[in-house]
């Protein structure tokens, strides 16, 4: 049955004939095969909600915490006075300086795993659009095109005043309206990922289903060897514009080819899937490919979600805060929050504020030789779209993730601020791009979110003091005419950190809101014992051992030791320990009686009873 991707409801005959006439069926409609309530979760997200089997799929819309805030339909909002908001690059320059600085607690895995998990529910089609299609937004005759929202660089720019660069490319986000998938008035930003945290960045990245990634042998994913190590296979349509020929050839056909941290986690989780298959096959030699694949996928997905919503969230917010917010429980047992009346939802605010972690992005990767000696700092941004280089230096890049990330201290790394995508864009200020995109997305002003989550109405700059660091209030007052004009991202850049945690309080509310929406609308959530093929208590206990250190000890190149807390930098309190001391999943609890050899009975006769 064909469903409408936008509404998630069965498509009417009339709608289908409109889609067919306009060649839109493949984009705007999704084929939902009949649901079986007891089947494993499907990689395309269909049938998660049995009453609304078309919701939460690859091209389904993003929702909003607060209503969209646009000017004139789909233009960037104006200040309260009706004037334009301050230029994004100018706000970035004034709020965030450029500095080399080291986070006191976290290593590269904090921002790195954050962006990896974003790929489960968000997509980078906007960046693709900017790099491959709408490449001309800085050309004078195109600056005002509807597709373009360039970032203007002023003549007195502190960096580019010595160069002719006066503009950075940026595009208006693509909408379901652009594709012809709805006639709704409010622009609906597209997303190319299933709405659920179902590890779709591994199992269904281009919406092509699992067929293209499976080997159909023992449940495993397809891999290719390079220097004796398994990697996701190359292919004819893969695009890695920064690979340097002839040495650098790796480029994944069926996974994203983007940033260093995303590439590392893709490689690790693909290998981890196959490792799980080996372990399951060891305890259950009678299981076929199908059963091994779906069980391994389920464990691999639960592993990533446990790492994200428990370990990563705890690292950022602290255990006490998370228990208070309901994200963690003291008991750590099963829990079923699924409510079939809730729609699967990802909010635009959530996908947007993940960009705040750009502040933690380091610009250097520490490189080591085979003996583990430090050799040099590699300009980390030069590894983007360059899977070939990453594959050739796995040991070094893996080790580099244990160095401290950039501190959240009112500054960003220079490369992040000026050459965000070397090799493909002459100049790019990533945080300024973030600010500009928030306006393009129609994200409401900062104080509206403060009111939504805390009930506190902020009417003057002075009243910001509870949330914003003292030294920023004057800067904000200089930049914005009215406190109600301040952009959400800028408010987050200037925020105090939450008590007991290391991110802004408002950011934590938005992250936790996403957690609840996600868990309560996912029938296949791993912590629930009522789902089909649910874990047993013993299995859940094993999955709860998931940590970044456990992952790297299992599949990381040349990793023999890790700190117990793999998101924290190495310190006296968090020293490197042998991998034998890092908890690992014991797969024996998946042993299936059906695979046990049957006891021989002589001639089928029952033993005599005397
Ligand atoms: C490895 C270094 C990184 C580079 C080179 C990079 C580069 C970029 C660029 C160029 C954009 C587009 C900006 C725009 O809209 O104008 C972007 C978007 C984004 N970045 Fe990063 N980034 C990096 C790391 C991170 C990290 C660590 C996170 C979060 C933990 C992150 C989260 C995001 C998100 C969520 C988007 C929005 C994607 C979209 O909706 O299109 N990035 N990044
Ligand atoms: Ca997903």
Image (cartoon, rainbow, N blue to C red):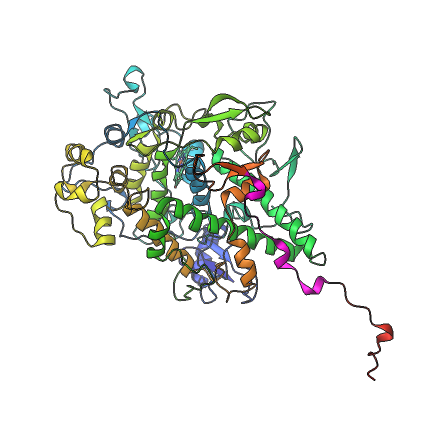
Image quadrant occupied by the C terminus: bottom right
Asked whether the viewer can see residue 345, the reply is no
- Outermost residue on the front side: it is 572
Q: Where is residue 486 in the image (x, y as percent from the top left)?
A: 20, 40
Q: Which residue is drawn at 33% across and 56% down?
A: 324
Q: What stretch is highlighted in magenta?
A: 578-596
Q: Residue at x 71, y 62 (%)?
A: 595
Q: Can residue 469 be seen in this view?
A: yes
* Relative image position of residue 371 (x, y in whole percent): 59, 25
Along the viewing direction, whichever of 445 and 31 lies nearer the viewer: 445
- From the viewer's perspective, is 316 left or right of 77? right
Task: Give x and y (percent) for residue 522.
Answer: 45, 60
The quarter of the image that holds ligand 1 is top left
Left or right placement of residue 46 versus residue 272 in this view: left
Q: Quadrant of residue 558?
A: top right
Residue 510: x and y in percent read: 32, 50
Residue pictured at 32% horizontal, 42% vertical: 503
* Residue 525 among those drawn in magenta: no
Q: Which of 602 and 162 is in front in this view?
A: 602
Q: Is 591 within the magenta?
A: yes
Where 282 sits versus 154, above or below? below
**For residue 147, what is the image quadrant?**
top left
Residue at the extreme right of the image, as rendered: 603
């Amino acid at each position: 049955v064909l469903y409408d991707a936008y509404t998630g409801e069965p498509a009417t005959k009339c709608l289908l004939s409109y889609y067919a006439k306009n060649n839109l069926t493949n984009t705007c409609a999704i084929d939902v095969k009949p649901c079986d309530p007891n089947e494993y979760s499907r990689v395309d997200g269909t049938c998660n909600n049995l009453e609304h089997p078309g919701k939460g799929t690859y091209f389904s819309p993003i929702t909003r915490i607060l209503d969209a805030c646009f000017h004139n339909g789909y233009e960037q909002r104006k200040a309260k006075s009706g004037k334009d908001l301050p230029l994004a690059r100018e706000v970035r320059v004034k709020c965030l300086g450029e500095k080399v600085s080291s986070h006191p607690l976290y290593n590269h895995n904090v921002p790195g795993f954050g962006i990896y998990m974003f790929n489960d529910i968000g997509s980078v089609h906007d960046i693709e659009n900017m790099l491959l299609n709408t490449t001309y937004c800085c050309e004078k005759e195109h600056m005002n095109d509807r597709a373009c929202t360039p970032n203007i660089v002023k003549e007195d720019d502190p960096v580019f005043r010595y160069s002719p660069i006066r503009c950075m490319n940026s595009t208006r986000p693509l909408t379901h309206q652009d594709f012809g998938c709805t006639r709704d008035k409010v622009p609906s930003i597209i997303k190319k990922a299933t709405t659920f945290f179902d590890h779709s960045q591994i199992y269904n990245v281009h919406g092509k289903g699992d067929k293209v990634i499976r080997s159909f042998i023992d449940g495993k994913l397809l891999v290719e060897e390079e220097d004796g190590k398994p990697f996701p296979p190359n292919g004819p349509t893969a695009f890695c514009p920064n690979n340097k020929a002839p040495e650098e050839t790796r480029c994944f056909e069926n996974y994203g080819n983007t940033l260093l941290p995303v590439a590392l986690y893709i490689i690790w989780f693909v290998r981890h899937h196959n490792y799980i298959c080996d372990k399951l096959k060891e305890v259950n030699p009678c299981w076929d490919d199908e059963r091994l694949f779906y069980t391994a996928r389920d464990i691999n997905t639960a592993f990533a979600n446990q790492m994200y919503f428990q370990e990563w969230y705890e690292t950022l917010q602290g255990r006490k805060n998370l228990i208070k917010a309901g994200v963690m429980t003291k008991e750590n047992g099963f829990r079923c929050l699924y409510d079939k009346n809730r729609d699967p939802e990802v909010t635009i605010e959530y996908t947007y504020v993940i960009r705040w972690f750009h502040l933690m992005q380091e610009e250097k990767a520490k490189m080591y030789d085979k003996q583990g000696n430090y050799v040099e700092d590699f300009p980390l941004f030069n590894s983007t779209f360059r899977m070939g280089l990453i594959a050739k230096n796995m040991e070094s890049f893996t080790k580099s993730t244990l160095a401290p990330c950039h501190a959240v201290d009112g500054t960003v790394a220079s490369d992040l601020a000026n050459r965000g995508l070397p090799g493909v864009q002459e100049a790019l200020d990533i945080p300024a791009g973030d600010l500009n995109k928030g306006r393009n997305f129609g994200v409401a002003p900062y104080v509206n979110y403060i009111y939504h989550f805390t009930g506190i109405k902020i009417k003057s700059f002075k009243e910001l003091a509870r949330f914003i660091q003292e030294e920023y209030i004057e800067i904000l007052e200089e930049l914005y005419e009215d406190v109600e004009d301040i952009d959400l991202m800028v408010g987050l850049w200037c925020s105090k950190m939450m008590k007991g945690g290391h991110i802004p309080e408002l950011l934590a509310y938005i992250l936790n809101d996403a957690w609840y929406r996600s868990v309560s609308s996912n029938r296949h959530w791993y912590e629930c014992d009522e789902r089909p093929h649910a874990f047993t208590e013993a299995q859940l206990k094993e999955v709860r051992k998931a940590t970044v250190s456990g992952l790297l000890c299992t599949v990381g190149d040349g990793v023999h030791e890790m700190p117990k807390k793999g998101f924290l930098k190495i310190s006296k309190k968090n020293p490197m320990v042998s991998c034998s001391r890092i908890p690992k999943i014991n797969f024996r609890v998946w042993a299936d009686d059906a695979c046990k050899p049957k006891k021989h009975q002589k001639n089928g006769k029952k033993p005599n009873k005397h």
